[in-house]
Image (cartoon, rainbow, N blue to C red):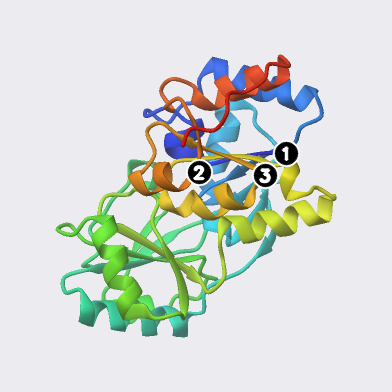
Amino acid sequence: MIASDLDGTLLRNDGTLSPRTLRALRRAEEAGTEIVIVTARPPRFVDRLAEATGLAGTAVCSNGALVYDIATRTVASSRVLSLATAQRVATALAAAVPEVGFALETGNQVFYEPAYRLRLSEDVGAELPVPSLADLWLTEAPVTKLLVWSDRIDADTLLAAARSGAGDEVQLTHSGGRGLLEISAQGVTKAGTLEVLCAARGIDATEVIAFGDMPNDLTVLAWAGTGYAMANAHPSVLAAVAAHTGTNEEDGVADVIERLFAGQVLPEPAV
């Protein structure tokens, strides 16, 4: 199995999948390798990518909260965050880090309160405002992530503050978004969900090659038999992961796949 993150990893900076990378993925599939997308992105983003590239198969979405069948556009399994937990954590974070905004990701939509002013062009039509923070906790749709945003604090600093303020009640991470923290139910990680998926398929961790670039990828890069950090990865990822490949702009994922299926001996992991 090849398990790959999307943004900053499989995709180029403009959000496209290069022809070279697409050819490499097809070659791996033809050789009997399953390709699994493992991303912080929601299913609606994966749908658009599939329409543009023809990718199918399975995606682990929302940092492990959802297992999504791309071909049928159905959620195979989910681990949601309770509204009560989200509200408690938000209250603690608001006290610890003033002037942050909150939103709830459902996989299909993003509900946001007035202080959450982050807008993403790819989410046009999916973003729904609520009148106040109190109204956010009236959302009826199952929640995959609580999003915390600041226009003055970077994601690393926000993550450190949240870890001291939120305790062990939730899973905290970020995927490189400017000032954006992502919070899932406790124990929900990319690696945990991928491990369950692999067990159902009879695939051992040693048979998995993973690619990633951000802190939310660390669990899966550590769990997989072989994990590659992109050359453009977050410093913490480059430091934690021994094997490195080229940047996403240089088709670093494709480079590894091409050499692997050409029977070449890959270089020893960088230290």
Q: Quadrant of residue 261?
A: top right
Instruction: Measuring from the top left, give residue 73's x and y in whole percent.
Output: 67, 47
Q: Earlier in the sequence, mark 1 or mark 2?
A: 1
Q: Nearer the viewer, residue 233 or 85?
A: 233
Q: Are marks 3 and 1 in contact (CB under 8 Å)?
A: no
Give the secondary structure at mark 1. loop
Q: Is residue 215 left or right of residue 263?
A: left
Disc 1: which residue: 1
Q: Is residue 92 above or below residue 58?
A: below
CA gap between label 2 and label 3 equals 28 Å
The residue type indicated by label 3 comes to Gly
Q: Is residue 39 left or right of residue 88?
A: right
Disc 3: which residue: 225
Q: Quadrant of the N terminus?
A: top right
Task: Identify the residue shown where x is 14% and y is 58%.
Answer: 152
Task: Identify the residue shown where x is 64% and y is 18%.
Answer: 259
**Residue 204 makes an appearance in the image:** yes
Of circles 2 and 3, the one toward us is 3
